[in-house]
Structures are given as structure tokens and as C-alpha cells.
Amino acid sequence: MLINKNIFSAKNLLNVLISLIPLSIIIGNFIINLNVILVCLLGLIIYRFEIFKLDKKIYQYLIYSFFLYIILITLYKNLPNLEVNILFKEHIIKSFLFLRFFIFFLVISKIVEEGSFNTKLFFISSAFFSFIIAVDILVQVYTGTNLLGLPITLGRPSSFFGGENIAGGYLQKFSFFFIFLGPIIIFKSLNKKIIFVFLSFSLFFLSILLTNNRMPFLIYCFSLIIFLFFEKRLRKFFLFTIIFSLISFFIIIKNVTVVKDSFNSLYTSIKHITLIAPKLFYYKEIKEEIPFNNGYLIVFNSGIQQWKENKIFGDGLKSFRINCEYGHNRTCQSHPHNYFIEIMIDTGLIGLSLICLIFIFVFFNFLKYYSGNANFQTRLTTMPFFLIFFFEFFPLRSSGSFFTSSNSILIFLSLAILINIKKIDNVEKN
């Protein structure tokens, strides 16, 4: 939709704030939360109580229920223990503060629902910052420092993220905005579109691989597979891209020792998780020793065993670090590094059921929309949002905390867009 011609209108300002989300994630949690709060405040000023009315009633009831349940179960589990540990009080406060993402979701839903969301602006912003990060990683690998002079830390280039090795995860989420930008906006010729997609995919393939962020790299590759699953007629055009990617992967694996060792470790971890993970749900204690180098599996086991203590209702927001126990094949961390396990621990099967229902409805709503939409460019416009949402909830991946700002902002942004997917216009029309 064309946005209001008045460039300084409130809705245009709201679109600018939304488009700055990719930048805010680079800068850090303070700016992310500031951005979320500004979006919420401006949205409330523009829409007032209208934001609480959604066209999609089933999503409205599920989202309302999920956020309400988080607060109720956190209060119930933490209020009796306020004098025992200050963390109980902190978690009650955080359960109410988490409501900012509820308002954020409603504001995004409303602006998309009424056709005022500037898809083109968000697309360009995401494409620009993902491109800058990708190039910066290559510079950092080649020269030893990035464009700001930040060095490689622990053998892993992290671009502007400094000591946080999350650049690969950032590119995995935002790269397809750049990859699809050429075919949607820049080029009209089919040959030029194919060349642009090949070069841009290769750029991000190499950049993510060099960050040594293994799971984002695998998800990036699987994202291409998912895309080709939907767009069967493009498979022959991507054949050369796939062959080039495989050759590049094996060359880097062979010549870069750090990357080679890392992926060998990943293969071993995946094998152990595949063999052992199903047992975690059936047995209270795994008798066989979990390999020490498979830290995620030990954390998964710790989370699952804790969930078994309160399967139905859960123990309230961020309860893992309070209730976890050290022991055989068990450890303690701030969160269990898996969305589903974390949600099970904090909200039990009730909260997990609400999240799964939301995911299922979104998934089938997207399938129905995508298969019935004949406009190729419009399909490309919506695909990056689906890829972000789908792989955020991929059950076998290790992840950050569901309740952290950098993850929640993308989850609820993508959710709000996908449930109103019919209102998303081709980027070229904005």
C-alpha cells in the first residue's frame, strides 16, 4: 500500500521505527527495548484501544491466553517465595515487563491489518544491514579487524557484535531480504535476477560459514531447501548455486582448521542428540554418560528433567535458573537453549499447547496463501518472514531464550505479519 504522502505522519514514523529493528539488534538489547517501547507508545497513540481488536479472532484468543497465563503462573509460583530469593521478585516483574511484546505484536498486527505497513522500507533496511554485516565479516577475516577496527575473538569473526558470536545467526535471519530484493525491485531481466540471487546467496553462504556459527549455517542452507520446495520451477536455476556452495563448503572445511574441527564436533553432537534425546523424555535419569563435549544435550536433559517436576502448569517465567539442579548429566544455566523446552519448563503443557496451536495455524495459513498466490514477487516478499518464524521454532535446534528481547522482537514481528499475510503487498508496490 502507498503510505501517507505526509512524510512526517505518525504512521510513517511508526514504519521508520519498525524498519530500524535490524539496526537495533546489531546495537544491542537497550536499543531493542527502546525501539519496542517507542513502537508500543506510538501505536497506542495512533490506534488507542483499537489495537486490542484483531480481525483474526482465533489468534487474538491464543495470544491473549498465552500472555495472561505467563503472568498468572509466574505470580502463583513466585509470590510464596519472595523472601527466599530476590530472583523470585525479579521474575514477577519481568513477567509484567514481557507484556511490552504483547502490545508490540498488537501494534504491528494493526498496521499490517489496515494496509499501512511499509513492506518496502523494512525490506530495504533488512537487506542493507545484512549486506553490511556480510561484507564486514569478509573484511574481518581478510584483515583481522572489521570496519570499526574490532578484532576476531576466539577465532570467530563477529563483525559489529564484538564479543558476542552471533553474526551468523543475524545473517541467517535477514539475508533473504537482500537475496530477494534484486528479483523484486532492482532487476527486470530473468538472467540478471538469476545472477543476482546466485552472487548474493554465495556471499551470505561464505560469510555465515566463516563465522563458525554452525546451526545458523545449517538453517541458512535448509532455508534454501524450503524455498525450493515451494518454488519447484526455480530448482534448475539453483542447481549451479547448490553445486558451488557444496564445493566452497568442502574447500573451507579442508583448509580452515577451526571450521573443520567445529563441524566435526557438530556432527558428533547431532549424532549423540539423535540417539539419546528421545530417551530424555522417557527416563528420569540417563544411565549412560552424556559426552562432556555435548554441552547442549546436557542442558536439554537438565531442562526436560526439571519440566517433569511440573508437566502441566510449569513453574513460571525464567524458572530454569532458580530450580535447576547439578547432578549426573545435569547442569544449570540461565535458560535451557531450546524454545520448546524453555516454554515447557516455564508454562507447562498448557503454555506449550498455546504456542503450538499458534504455530500450526500460522503454518497452514501461510501454505494456503502461498499456494493460492499467483504473483511470484508477492510470494518472495512474504517468504523471508516465514523462514524466520519457521526456523525460530525448529524443535531440534539450539537457541537463545524465547523471552530475551532480540528473539522476542523477531518472533512477534513475524507472527503479526504472517497472520495478516493477505494484507502484505508486493514490495515493488510500496
Image (cartoon, rainbow, N blue to C red):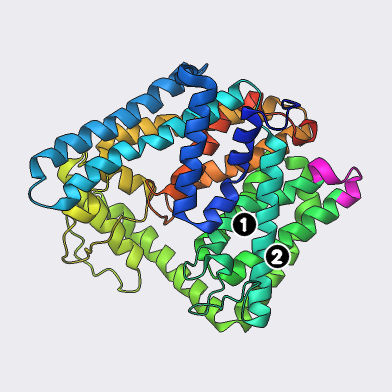
* Residue located 71% across and 51% down the image: 178
Q: Is residue 65 above or below residue 84?
A: above
Is there a contact, CB below 8 Å, between mark 2 and mark 1? yes
Reading the image, the residue beneath label 1 is 221
Q: Is residue 153 above or below residue 347?
A: below
- Residue 309 position, x and y percent, is 15, 45
Spatial separation of the CA atoms under disc 2 and disc 1: 9 Å
Say which label, 2 or 1, has the lower sequence index: 1
Q: Is residue 258 above or below residue 280?
A: below
Q: Nearer the viewer, residue 364 or 186?
A: 186
**Residue 184 lies in the magenta-colored region:** yes
Secondary structure mostly seen in magenta is helix
Q: Quadrant of the C terminus?
A: top right
Q: Quadrant of residue 232?
A: top right
Reading the image, the residue beneath label 2 is 245
Crowd tier of the residue under label 2, counting other residues whose Cα lies within 10 Å: few below 14, some 14–19, many 20 or above: some
Question: Circle 2 sits in a helix, a strand or a loop, which is it?
Answer: helix
Q: Is residue 322 left or right of residue 278?
A: left
Q: Quadrant of residue 141?
A: bottom right
Q: Quadrant of the N terminus?
A: top right
Question: Circle 1 sits in a helix, a strand or a loop, which is it?
Answer: helix
Query: Over which residues does the magenta segment extend?
Result: 183-192
Crowd tier of the residue under label 1, counting other residues whose Cα lies within 10 Å: few below 14, some 14–19, many 20 or above: some
Please state which amino acid type lies under the numbered disc 2: Ser
* Residue located 43% across and 21% down the image: 60
* Residue located 66% across and 28% down the image: 9
Q: Is residue 364 visible?
A: no
* Residue located 45% across and 23% down the image: 59
- Residue 409 position, x and y percent, is 48, 43
Please state which amino acid type lies under the numbered disc 1: Cys
Q: Nearer the viewer, residue 401 or 394?
A: 401
